[in-house]
Amino acid sequence: MEFFRIRRDIPFMRHALVLNVISLVTFLAAVFFLATRGLHLSIEFTGGTVVEVAYAQTADIGKVRATVEAMDAGDTQVQNFGSSRDVLIRLPLREGVKQGELVGRVFAALCSSEGGVVESRQGVSDKGEAVSKQVCAAGSAEPLTLQRSEFVGPQVGKELAADGAKALAFVIFGIMIYLAIRFEWKFAVAAIIANLHDVIIILGFFAFFQWEFSLAVLAAVLAVLGYSVNESVVIFDRIRETFRRFRKLDTKQVIDHAITSTISRTIITHGSTQMMVLSMLIFGGPTLYYFALALTIGILFGIYSSVFVAAAIAMWLGVKREDLVKAGTKEIDPNDPNSGAVV
Amino acid sequence: MNRYPLWKYVILAIALLVGLIYTAPNFFGEAPAVQVSSGKVTVKLDAGFAGRVQQVLEQAGLKPDFVQFDGKSVKARLASTDEQIKAKDALSRALNTDPANPSYIVALNLLSRSPAWLASLHALPMYLGLDLRGGVHFLMQVDMKAALTKRAEALTGDVRTLLRDKTIRHSGINRDGDSLEVRFRERATLVAAQTLLSDQLPDLQWDEAVDGGGDFKLRGTLKPAAARLVQEQALKQNITTLHNRVNELGVAEPVIQQQGLDRVVVQLPGVQDTAKAKDIIGRTATLEVRMVNESAEAREAERGGAPVPFGSERFLERNGAPIIVFRQVILTGENLTDAQAGFDGQSHEPAVHLTLDAKGARIFRDVTRENIGKRMAILLFEKGQGEVVTAPVIRSEIGGGRVQISGRMSTTEAADTALLLRAGSLAAPMEIIEERTIGPSLGADNIDKGFNSVIYGFAAIALFMCAYYGLFGVISTLALTFNLLLLVAVLSMLQATLTLPGMAAIALTLGMAIDANVLINERVREELRNGSPPQLAIQTGYERAFATILDSNITTLIAGVALLAFGSGPVRGFAVVHCLGILTSMFSAVMFSRGLVNLWYGRQKRLKSVSIGQVWKPDVQSAGKA
C-alpha cells in the first residue's frame, strides 16, 4: 500500500497568500470570540462547586433546576452529563455561603424533592473494600445517587489559572529557545507564530461553542503544542537539506519540495495519533471528551499550520540559502594564531 | 551490516524481562483482605503481631492466604468477601477487649492477588487514583498566621512569668498580631528587661520602640528562623493530628501528605460519606483551657446587663448559655496527650479522663491549687469561633497530670467530648479549600473507559501499521507494545498513582510514539525508492530518522516538563506519564525495533527485498512490491 504517489512537487506555496489570509481571518475570528464570549472556564479555575448525581429514571432537568434555584445559591447551571439520567449541577462561589456544606445541602434538597431522606450507610463493595456513603433512601428505593462532587476554593482557582499561564509561557519560550538554537531565528519565529495560531484557534473553538475549558483541556493544548511544533521542525529540516542538495531551486521551489517529500509522513503520523485520540473521544466518556476534542482540533490544525503557515511565514520573512548553508565554509578569524596552518 | 553486538541484545532481553515482571502484578487483580493497625499512639505493632493475627484467624476457622507485617499494619489476604467479614469480626472481638476503647483498628482492604515471589521483588501493582476507585479528596490550607499568633500568645505568658520572677516592674504587656510590646516607666528597667528577655527567649528579637505616651516601650518580634520553625512544626503537628483523626474513620489506606509550605492533602479511598469524613477531618479545632471569670461584673455580663470585663471574653456553652472566660490561656491542646471516656470511680457517673504531659501537669497542679472551688473552661475553637466544651468546677488540687471531668453529662456526651479532645488538637486551624468526591461506580466506569480508549486506539494503529508497512509495520507494532509494557513497568516500579488523566496520557503517548516508527519506515522506503539496496536502506533509514525523532521528542518533552513543573493534581498525573512515555518510546521505537529488524534481516547477506509495504516509484510504474 502506498497512499502518496506524488510525481511532481506540489506547489503548496503558490496558494500561500490565499491560505494565509484565511488563517489570519480564522485567527482574528478566534481572538474576537475569545474577547467577546470568553472561555467557559471550569470550576478548577474559577472556584465553585460541581455536583454530579445519577437518577434511577430519566432526570427531570426542569425540576432539578427549580430545586437548586430555590436554594438561592447564585447563578447555577443544571445540565445532562453523558446520559439522560446523569445530571451535572454547577454552583458559583458566593460570599457568605459555606461552600464546604453546599454539596450536602444540594444533595439533601434533591433527595427530599424525590421524596427521600439522606442517610449514612456503611457497607462493603462487592470486591471487599469498606465503603461508607450517604444514600438517598425513599423506602427501599434509591431515586438518586451522588456520583461525584467537587469544590474548589477561590485561592486554589486563582493559583491554577496563574500556573496554567506560567506553563503556557514556559512551553512557548522553551520551544522558541530550542528552535533558535536548532535553526535560524526566522524559522523559530515562523514555527512559534504557526503554533500559537493553532493554540489561539483551539481556544477560539472553545470560546465559540462555550465548551468547558478545564485543566485537562489546558494539558491537551500544551501537549499538542509540543507535538505539532515538531511537525514544523521536520519540514524545516527538509528545507535545510533541500537547500544544500539542490542548488538551482529558488526558495519557493525548495519549500515546495521539502513539504512534498514529508507530506506522507506528516499525514500518517498525525493520522495514527488522531486514531488514538478518536478512540478516546468515542470510548473515553464525558470526562475525557473535551480533552480529546482539544487534541483533535489541535492535531488537525497542527497539520494545516505546519504545511501552510509555518513554511509560508518563513518564506515571507525571507529565508535564503545563505541563512542555512553556512556550515560548509568556516569563517576564519584573522586574529587566531592557529589560523592558516591547517594540516 | 545490520547486526547488533550481543550486549545490545542482552540489554533488550533484560529490559523485556524487567518490563514483564513489573507489569505482571497489574493483571492479577485484587483480593479481599483485612488490615489491622494501631488505634492508639501507645500501641505499637511489630512483626510478632502477625503471628497473633494468624492465630486468631485460625481459631475462627479461617485460612488466610498469608498474614504479613508491612511496617505499619498487619494485613491478611482472604479468599472471599464472606471470609473477609468473618475475619474482621473475629479480629475485632479478639483484639479489642474493650469495644468502647479499641486498641486496634480493623479495616477491610484490598490486596493484590499477585504471587508472593513477585511481591518479594517489590513488583507491586500501580496504585489507583481516587477517580478510578472512588473516595474523597481534600486539600486543606493551614492558617499560618494563626499559628504565629498562638505562639506569640504563649510567649506573652512566658515574658510575664520571667519579669515577675526577676521582679522587673513593667506597666503592661500587649500582643499586637504576632509581636509583643512591654511598657516600662523607667529606662533602666527597660535595659534590664531587654538583657533578660534576649537571654531567656532566643526566639524573639527585642528592640526599643518609640512610644507617644512618654513610656518606654520594648517590642519583641519573632525571628524569621523561629517563625519558620513555628510554621513547620504547626504543619507537622496538624498532619499527625489528621492521621489520628483519620484512624478513627478506619480507612484502609489513607493518604495524608504535605503539599507546598502550608497545605495538606487528605485522600480517603472508599469513603463517599463526605459529611462524616469532614466532620472528623475538617474539625478544624484547637483546644484551650482557661479560667472562668466569676466576679460580680462577669456575672452581670453573663446576663447581658454589663459590658464584658477587661481581659475577659464571652463564649457560649454547648447548651447555649453564655459564660465569661479570662483571655489568659492556661493550657493548649499541645499539652494534652490522651483523653478517654469512662466512668467516675466513686459515683459511677460518665466521665472523661485526660492525661497531660509534664509541662501541662505542672501548670495544671499550680492552677488547681490556687483555684479550688472555681470553674475552669475547656474551649474548642473551630474556624475562629470558640465554644466551651465543658466548664467543670475544680474540686481539689490535681497533680500527676491525670485529670477527670465528670458530672452533668451522658455517656455519649462523654464519648463525644473525649473524641474531640483525643483526636488531638491542631496547632493551627485548617480550612478545606478543595474537595472532590468520586463514587465507586463512577470510578469503575472510568477504569473501563480509560482502558477501552487505550485498547481500541492501540488496535486501530496496529492494524493500520501492519497493513501499510507489512513486516516493518508488525515490528513497529511490537515496538509499540514494548513501549506500553515498559511504561506500565516503570509506573509500577515508581508506585505511581494511576488516574484517568494518566490513562489518557498513556493513550496519547502511544499515539505520538508511533511517530518515530512512521518516520523510520518512511525514510527506509524513501531510500529504497532512491534505489539503495535493502540492507543499506535499513541502515541509512534508521540513522537519518534518528535526528528527527530526537527533535520531535525534545519539543514534546518541553511541553511535558512545563506541565510537570506548573501543573497540579490531575495534570501532574498526566505530565508524569507523558514525560516517562516519551523517554520509553525513544528506547523502544529506535533500539527495540532496530533490534528486531536486525534479528530478522541482519543475517541475510544477499537481501533482495524487505517487507515494508509497497514502495512506489514515480518513474517506474511497474516496480510493484519491492
Image: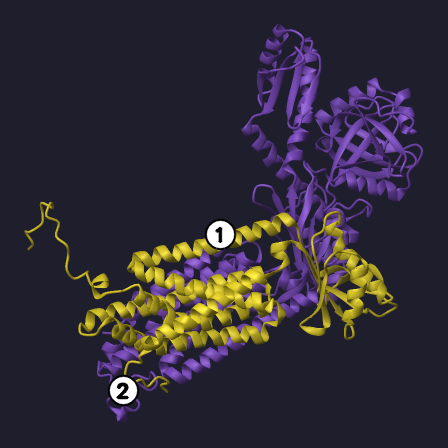
Residue B270 at x, y percent in the picture? 70, 59
Q: Is residue A164 left or right of residue B160?
A: left
Residue B464: assigned label: none
Residue B43 at x, y percent in the picture? 70, 42
Callout 1 amino acid: Lys
Local packing at callout 1 (Cα closer than 10 Å; few below 14, some 14-19, many 20+) is some
- In the rendered structure, the colour chosen for chain A is yellow
CB of mark 1 within 8 Å of CB of mark 2?
A: no
Quadrant of image for the C terminus of chain B = bottom left
- In the rendered structure, the colour chosen for chain B is purple
Up-down: is B337 above or below B135?
above
Q: How is the image coloured?
A: by chain
Q: Residue at x 67, y 30 (%)?
A: B149
Which residue does the numbered mark 2 point to in the structure image?
Answer: B617
Q: Is A270 or B328 nearer to us in this picture?
A: A270
Which residue does the numbered mark 1 point to in the structure image?
Answer: A166
Q: Residue at x 76, y 60 (%)?
A: A133
Chain assignment, label 1: A
Quadrant of image for the N terminus of chain B = bottom left
